[in-house]
Amino acid sequence: MKEILKKFIPDFVLSWYHWKLALAAAILYWFPSRKLKTIGVTGTNGKSTVAEMVLKILEEAGYKTAVLSSIRFKIGEKDWPNTLKMTMPGRFRIQRFLRQAVNAGCQYAVLEVTSEGIKQHRHKFIDFEAAVFTNLSPEHIEAHAGFENYRAAKGKLFQAAKKIHIINLDDENAEYFLQFPAAKKLGFSLLKNREHSSVSFSRERVSAITAENIRASSAGIQFSVENEQFTLSLMGEFNIYNALAAIYVGISQGINLETCKAAVEKIKGIPGRMEEVVSEPFKVFVDYAFTPNALEKVYRTIKNNFQPQKMICVLGACGGGRDKWKRPVLGELAAQYCDEIIVTNEDPYDENPMEIIDEVAEGTSGKAKKILDRREAIGESLKLARPGDVVVITGKGCEPWICLAKGKKIPWDDRQVVKEEFQKFQK
């Protein structure tokens, strides 16, 4: 019924409706963000990892902090998983969360901010201390009717946050986000990409930090910032960017590099993000990646760091009419990097799951095996693996549901399913 009504109600009426809800929620909970320093993190990829890193840095500095992400909700010591299948919940839930954070004595709140959430004014009436931009690549294109609209939605966070802007200067969209006024503009970059970022550095007078002396291995990544050496137990160049974003949030709040270093080095992994679920006799990784940009980074990182004998990949694509353009693109990437490909069900919503699978498999030029049942697909990938191989299962990470037609959801966790299927080989 809701989707039918949306087709007949003009966009400006829907926008007005969402704005009114945001105002009502803020009034109901007494504008809680006025008593917090709220950090908003937006971008296509990396939001959850940056939010977790910011949380750790603030806690290491002694601040009581709340976080709301696609992974979890946390208020001080209280921690519970995000089972909503929504990165950025509705207005009343967000404002209630912020009020609970205030009541619990939190000084900071860290929020993932999505383009769809911004489109529905869920960010309104939140006083942001800082806005963080991670990166941008095509996503939610159909929902926003084009990439420019998608980017503009992200930009509205920076219009709302007037104090501190923290921006990835190596992203090709950095110039767009640098245009918004702020009391402080802070940027981060990798030394090898500094040339790409030099225009932004000079013209916008951005205070910047740069990662240097980068070394990557299967054990993690090392880099230095202003002669401070960082060693992270996370893989991939993209996690250097995530760390830099979080470090600059810390610096912007008067936290020194030594404290930032101590915090991020305590992170041994992010749930469902390049998470190693099986280590021997072969490796199995579960990752949330569901965009072409993120998927390629995962595949490339594993290839470079582990040089597997064979890489076996399980993937799908989200349904519900979402970004159909990327389905064959995901298949093409799998064909480029993977030795064995299994395309399976992910979150079909109201679409025919086999049609989605067929569209992804089309991009592999006949290289993929198609298995509808996701558990069966994961089990098959493990059967194919031998010592020295790596299995990569993408698309869901630590998400707790598979979403089916008519709002039906079934409990799920890729990581748990991997463990259960792997145990069958041990008997």
Image (cartoon, grey):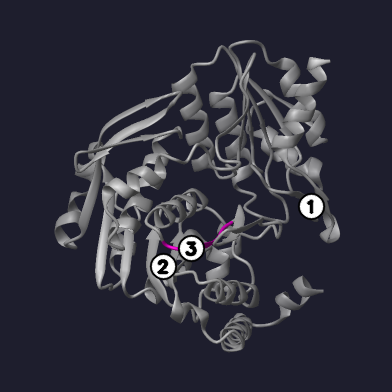
Give how far across and how far down residue 344 sits, in percent.
75, 35
Horizontal side of 400 relative to 259 (left or right) equals right
Q: Amino acid at mark 2?
A: Gly
Give how far across and how far down residue 191 sits, in percent.
23, 39
Circle 2 packing at 10 Å, graded few (<14), some (14-19), many (20+), is many
Query: Is there any visible trace of residue 272 in the rendered image?
Result: yes
> Distance of mark 1 from mark 2, alpha carbons?
31 Å
Q: Secondary structure at mark 3?
A: strand
Query: Between residues 267 and 76, which one lies in front from this camera angle?
Result: 76
Residue at mark 1: 351
- Kindly report which numbered mark, 2 or 3, lies closer to the viewer in this rendering: 3
Query: Between residues 142 and 374, which one lies in front from this camera angle?
Result: 374
- Residue 105 lies, with reference to residue 85, above or below; the image says below
Q: Amino acid at mark 1?
A: Glu
Q: Compare marks 1 and 3 and give the one earlier in the sequence.
A: 3
Q: Quadrant of the N terminus?
A: bottom right
Magenta stretch, residue numbers: 63-69
Residue at mark 2: 155
Q: Say which residue appears at 60% left-offset and 48% top-offset.
A: 325
Q: Secondary structure at mark 2?
A: helix
